[in-house]
Every structure is written in C-alpha cells, then in structure tokens.
Amino acid sequence: MAPRCAFAPARASSLLLPRATVQIGGRTAINLPVARVSGISNAAASLRAMALHTPSAPSPVMVPALPPVFRYFSSAKPQNPVPRKRLPLVAALQAQRADAAPAAAEPPPPGASSAESSEAAGGSAGGSQSLAEFAPLTWPMRSHLCGELRGGDEGARVQLCGWAGAQRGLGGVIFISLRDHSGIVQVKSDPEQHPEAHAAAQRVRMEYVVRVAGEVRRRPADMVNGKMATGEVEVIASDVEVLNAVRVALPFSMTSAEGAADNIKEEVRLRYRHLDLRRPLMAANMRRRHEIVKTLRRFLEDEQGFVEVETPILTRSTPEGARDYLVPSRVQSGEFYALPQSPQLFKQMLMVSGFDRYYQVARCFRDEDLRADRQPEFTQLDMELSFTPLDEMLALNERLMQHLFKTIKGVTLPNTFPRLTYAEAMLRFGSDKPDLRFGMEIADISHIVAGSTFKVFESALEAGGVVRAVSVSGGAAKISATRLKKGDVFQEALKSGAKGLPFLKVLPEGNIEAIPAISAGFSDADKRAALLQSLDAQSGDLVLFAAGPAGQVAATLGRLRLFVAGSLGLIDESAEAILWVTDFPMFEWNEEEQRLEALHHPFTAPHPDDMADIRTARALAYDLVYNGVEIGGGSLRIFRRDVQERVFECIGLTHEQAEEKFGYLMEAFDLGAPPHGGIAYGLDRLAMLLLGQPSIRDVIAFPKTTAAQCLLTNAPAAVAERQLAELSIQVVGEEGEDTGDEGK
C-alpha cells in the first residue's frame, strides 16, 4: 500500500539540518550541511567539486573519493565535530596539500580501451585526481559548422568544435570523424606536417569534445564519400585541443546506424538520455518537432490572427476525468493547487475577455495510467475562437492540418475531410477513432439472425442487444481454427470483454462451414445470401461474430478488426486517412458510481436539436482522427449560466457544489460571454505520427517511463523532512506510523 500524507504542525526541531563532517588527509575537518541525493551527500559532492576546481592552490591537493555514508535524520551523530570557528573551505584544502604531485599520464596508444583512455584522461570517476592535471576552461569560437563544409570551401582556414566519432590510423596518419549538430566532417592529422596537432589527435577517443583548427582540402577522387554531405572535403588539422574527455565507459554508441537503437534497452537510453539525444535519429526527431511547432505558430499567428496567451500552471482542481497532480501551498497551509490537465476554463474566460482568437503551446499534467502514447506531463496545441460556427471551426482546422502535413511530411490532404457521426463510426468500425486505411466494415445482422436457435444470438436479442459481424478477406485459409478457438485471435476477443468468439468460413457457391448451432441458423439459402451480401463476403473469407449490448459488441469487433488486419498485413501503411468524428453523446453512464458523466467535459454545448432532453442529447463535439489515432478534439462551448447549471445537475453536482467549484466561470457567463468554441491537439502524439516513431517517448526530450519515473534524474524522489515540515505535511506508513525520520 502506498504511503499516505497527513498534516502535522511544523516542529522547530525538524527544521535543523544535520552536518556532515569530512576529513581530508586525516587532519582538517570541513563541516557542511547534508542533503540526501541519490545516496551521496551534497557535502561530499560539493567538497569534491570545489577541491578539483580550486585555481589558487599552490600545490596539488589530493581529494579521495568520499563514500555515501551520510543520511538525513540518522540516529548516528557526526564524529569529530569541528570547532565553532570553521576554516574557509579553500584554505582548509590548501592546508592539506599532498607531498608531491603525481607524474603526468602518458598519452594512451591509438586503439586503447575505454577504461585505458579514461585513466589516461585523468583517472576514474571515483579515484584521486590532482588539481595540476586540470587546464583552464576555454570557450572557443567556431568559424564554421562541421556539416556545412563543401568543395567550394577548399583552401579556407577553419576552426571547428564538436564530438569525436570514429578515430582510425592509416600509415601513420590519423583520421577523426568530427560531429556537431549540423553533421560530420573528416579531420586528417599528418605527423610530418603538424606534429603537435598529431600528438594531440592521438589522445582523442570516442565522444571526446575537441577543437580543431586547420585547412579545408578536397579529398582525392578515389576517397570521396558520396554518402556524406561533406564527403568531398576533409580538414587538415594544424591544431587539436581536447576541451573535455570522456572519463567513464560509454553505455552505447552515439554514431550507430539509424535503427540500431532497437538493440539498446529503452531503460538504458532513458538513464543516459543526454547521450541518447546525441544520436542522429533522436537529434533529428527533436529538430523536426521544433519545425512542427514553428509551422503551427506561423500559420496561426501570421495567417489567422491568433494571439498566444500563457495561462497559469498553479490552479485549482477541477473534475476533468483524470486524477490531478496536487501541489501543497506553504502560505495557505492545508490547501492545494492542482497542475492543469488543460487550460480549459482559462481559455474560455479569455473569450469573455474579448481576445477572439487564442492559442497556446501548453504544458498539461494528468496522473493516469501510462502507455506508449501517454505521459504524465504532455504538450498540447490549445486553441479557442469566438463567433465561429461549427463548419467554420472544422474548416479552419482542416487548413491548419493541410499546411502542417504538406510542410513537414510533403503530404497533400483532401480539401475537405470526411465526416462520420459517433453513431456511424461505432456501428461500422467499432471505434470512435476508426482507421480507414483498410476495409473490413462491421455490419449489423440482428434482423438476419432473428429467430436463430443459436443460444448466443438468441439470448442477446432477447435482452435488447445486437448481433454484428465482420468479414476477413481470405481469412478462412490464413487464420487457423486453433487461433480462433483458443489462440491469439480468441484471446483478443476475451480482452475486449467478450465471452467467446463465434465464426464461420465462406465456401464456394455461397455455402458456409461452422459449428452445427450456427449453421442451422443459416440453413435457408436466402438467409445465407443476405448474410454474405451484408458483409460483402466472398468464397474463402472468414466471418467473425459478436452478440450482446451494442457497446460491448462494438468494442469486441473494433478490437478484432484492428488486430486481424494488422496480423494479416491488410493495413496500407502508405495511406493518409484523416476524418472528423462528430455528434458524440453528451454523457455516458458511470456504472461504478451509478451516475452520468460528461463524455468529453461538462463545458461542451448540447446540440440545439436535442435541448428537450439534455440527458440524451448529442454534443457539439468533434475529434480529428488520423490513421486510427485521435490527434485532436474539441467542441463548441456552453456560454450561458442556465445551460451550464443544467449540465452540472445532470452529472450530479448540487447548486452549492457547482458554485464552489465553478462559480467564477458562471459569473463570467453573466458578464457577457460570447459564443465560442475550441480544440486541442496532442502535440507529442501528433509529432510521433508525423515522424513515424513508435512511441511518444521518441519525440520528447526527457520523457518519463510507463511507471512515471525519470531515470535520468531519479524523479520522483524523497524530500527532506524540513521541506515537508514547511508544508505542514507528514508522510505516514500503512498504519499511520511516522516515517519522517527518513526524510520521505
């Protein structure tokens, strides 16, 4: 069971930090506050960092690696406390200087292992180092970028900076692939022409950060590399400087061929995300994502007159379907902010303010179960418009998507996107985000099987349910009976909530093959013909059935449709299928809580034709679906108090609850709110689809895992008791015991 939070008054004693006592060379002690960070005290880390970068030490100071022995609120007291009058840190370090500096390390030979090169670069991360080994920090200026050099630059003197890729020796000459964000260029070091530069080049290893000065020359004709943009030239190095060395073994190669990341565990990639982003594929993803955002901004601002307005991150909790991330207030003890799941209410109030056309690239937060296309924090393109009817709202967004797809992907989308109502989409495709890149439409055959003696069909119809079916082209031979009776296809049906999977195979001349209970219901030739005609089924096809409540049947056949089409390769991966799904129901029934809840959100306007019974009304809501994935969704909004109060009543909010939670919004409605509506696009998901990536984690710079953790920074993490005390919070265990002594 997860720990629970309880409020407790702050204690003065809990705000006192323990001190870490660190001895250097066995004599002088430095007393510093401790903060527990990944098991190593900040005191130790700070001490080591400051010691290694003390420029004024008259002779080298050896600082041993410090063990992670200090923890917050430990019962053990620090040993050897220092006198009240403490020495300045640098003076204490200088007082402990070593007797002699270690001998300078010899340059490692070409081809040395990563461990050897790490040692040559200054020792392991945990070993002793001398201040004398550290050269002053420099910030050199580049004259050119690595990837922009061409044949026309022959003879130019250049200074380049970047990361070293492959280094190889040939006949005494060293070749280094130097890389920056613009690309790669080959650097050549000749010992006869520039011996000092050559000696420095010998020290360079994979992913060292280096500066190279030299002259651009054309490669010999037989050495031109047509696969590189810079393949006709190379830089003859006259000066090479290592700006920073790699001191530990690299977890993976940053210069692997595209697709090689498939061989790297994602956990490793996320743990070393700063290195993962150096890889060409990931770097390209980030830059293309930037192009997507820039394209959207330019269209909305320059062509459509939108204004970007930032809305608050610290706001109040509202019922929007997912759990909120809560932030306790230190100033208002016992009260909480919520991180926004969307800027919904603020953007509506901006319409009341008269901004007419608003947009924002907004950060949003939802504490929900994660999957490949979800993150706890995500980015959306948020838009809201006043005085814009439904057709114009959809047309404007069609122009936006047409411009984006053409600019980023070179794809021409249709002038007008197809539209399906929610009811049509669920009936024909079993999903409110149908994938139209392949056929396999679902048909309702309830009228055909009426009177059937097959118990599954009979019971479903008697209970007011439906019987529907889908035909799989060529499926009779391609999908075995084992897969249908207990294998993967059968398991997919069970995952959707079905209790079984009835099926039949279509034989030549309109005959069928099925279990006797199903065959008996189609013994009449006219019924068989009607079934096959409704499904457009041909000889050799496989027919899958589902029976029961309409929602359950749609879920089963919709899931089977996608699974079977994917497994048989029926989906046209080159297709660009985009459409609107409209006329969603206003509400859906929450079986667990026995109440209605808004299908989208409670601020969606009901259809004008359905105002007589708002509980069964259609909503003026719309989703944009691309290749079976929802990329955006929105609605026209309620802008009058009386209608909004009626919707709140339908979802079970009392008048007092509605006023407490949303009084400020309804007050805004009473102050002259214009008719308005909007839409929001999941920017991470949209980028994933446009760039052809399998997961949104591949288009987000620093994503979380499916357990909502950042492996790079180890977030979330425990915090100090003093921080909790400032917020009047205690973390308690399963039975309420105080666990604050661990700082959690």
Image: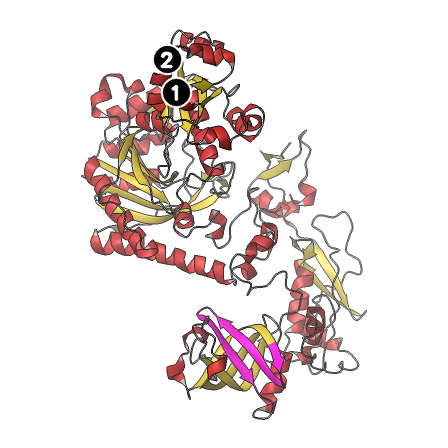
Q: Are marks 1 and 2 in contact (CB under 8 Å)?
A: yes
SS for callout 1? helix
Bounds of the magenta span? 168-191
Specify whether 62 is left or right of 501: right
Q: 455 or 240: which is nearer to us?
A: 455
Verify whether residue 187 appears in magenta. Answer: yes
Q: Return the x and y of residue 15 as percentages of the image width and height.
A: 63, 48
Residue 724 location, x and y as percent? 59, 43
Q: Residue furthest bottom?
A: 192
Query: Could you say whether the residue bearing mark 2 is in a helix, strand or loop?
Result: helix
Name the quadrant of the N terminus.
top right
> Which is more N-terminal, label 2 or label 1?
1
Q: Is residue 95 magenta?
A: no
The local crowd at label 2, few if under 14, some if 14 to 19, many if 20 or more residues have their Cα within 10 Å, is: few
For label 1, the crowd category at 10 Å Cα-Cα, with few meaning under 14, some 14 to 19 and many 20 or more, is: few
- Residue of label 1: 510
Amino acid type, callout 2? Ala
Q: Which residue is mark 2?
A: 525
What colour scheme does the image use? secondary structure
Among the 4 quarters of the image, the one containing residue 383: top left
Residue 115 shows up from this direction: yes
Q: Residue at x 57, y 91 (%)?
A: 194
Quick check: can you spot residue 673? no
Q: Is residue 215 left or right of residue 90?
A: left
Residue 290: give x, y in percent of width and height. 38, 58
Q: In terms of depth relative to the viewer, which is nearer, 367 or 112?
A: 112
354 is higher (above) or lower (below) than 504: below
At 38% from the left and 16% from the top, the residue drawn is 528
Quarter containing the C terminus:
top right
What is the x, y in percent for residue 689?
40, 47
- Residue situated in front as seen by the camera: 361 or 210: 210
